Image (cartoon, rainbow, N blue to C red):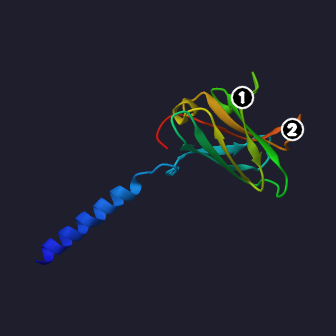
Amino acid sequence: MKRHVVAALAAALLTTAAASAQSYPGDPGTGVERGIEQVNNSGQVGTATLFHAGPSATRVLVVLHGAPPGRAQSVRIYRGQSCEDFAPGGPTHFLNDLKNGTSSSTVKLPEEKLLSGNYNVVVFSTNRAGAGATACGHLYPGAG
């Protein structure tokens, strides 16, 4: 009898775990995280997490440690095979400014395209023209 109760409890827990892992409309799920590293010895590092937001949209959450409090910093997506070649051609997407270390935006590009290895998330020192890059993260394909 005890064995049956334990087996039933284990089955119930597995069913609950599988159900809670599924996402529902509007739920961003766990997302795919990529690292952001410092540029120009800024000391700013963090992550860019991509969340599926529909068939042709992705929510991009950037969290940066070492960002100056109270200063707005521009965040852009550039085409490029690595953070060393992000500048040519200008940005493909303008994200919301990073404020107090966080930026959240939705871009009209599927998550799979952003994770093709052809895009970089670049953070700049301010949101003014001519600002230098302080951090960059390459959006590479593969397991999160």
- Please name the amino acid that badge 2 sits on: Ala
| Three-letter amino acid code of the residue under disc 1 | Phe
Q: Give whichever of 106, 45 is nearer the camera.
A: 106
Above or below: residue 87 compared with residue 17: above
Question: Could you say which is closer to the camera, residue 129 or residue 132?
Answer: 129
Q: Residue 84 location, x and y as percent?
A: 71, 30
User: Of helix, strand and loop, which one carries label 2?
Assistant: loop
Quadrant of image for the N terminus:
bottom left
What residue is drawn where x is 60% and y is 27%? Answer: 118
Q: Earlier in the sequence, mark 2 or mark 1?
A: 1
- Find residue 143 and name its label: none
Query: Residue under circle 2?
Result: 131
Outermost residue, top side: 89
Residue 57's x, y, as percent? 58, 36
Residue at x 59% of width, y 32% of height: 109
Give the quadrant of residue 69: bottom right
Mark 2 neighbour class, 10 Å CA radius: few under 14, some 14 to 19, many 20 or more: few
Please tell me in which quadrant of the rendered image residue 100 appears.
bottom right
Q: For the residue carrying disc 1, how many other residues have a C-alpha within 10 Å: few (<14), some (14-19), or many (20+)?
A: many
Q: Secondary structure at mark 1?
A: loop
Vertical placement of 122 versus 43: above or below? Answer: above
Q: Which residue is the site of mark 1?
A: 86
- Describe residue 29's horizontal placement relative to residue 47 as left or right: left
The residue positioned farthest toward the left in the image shown: 1
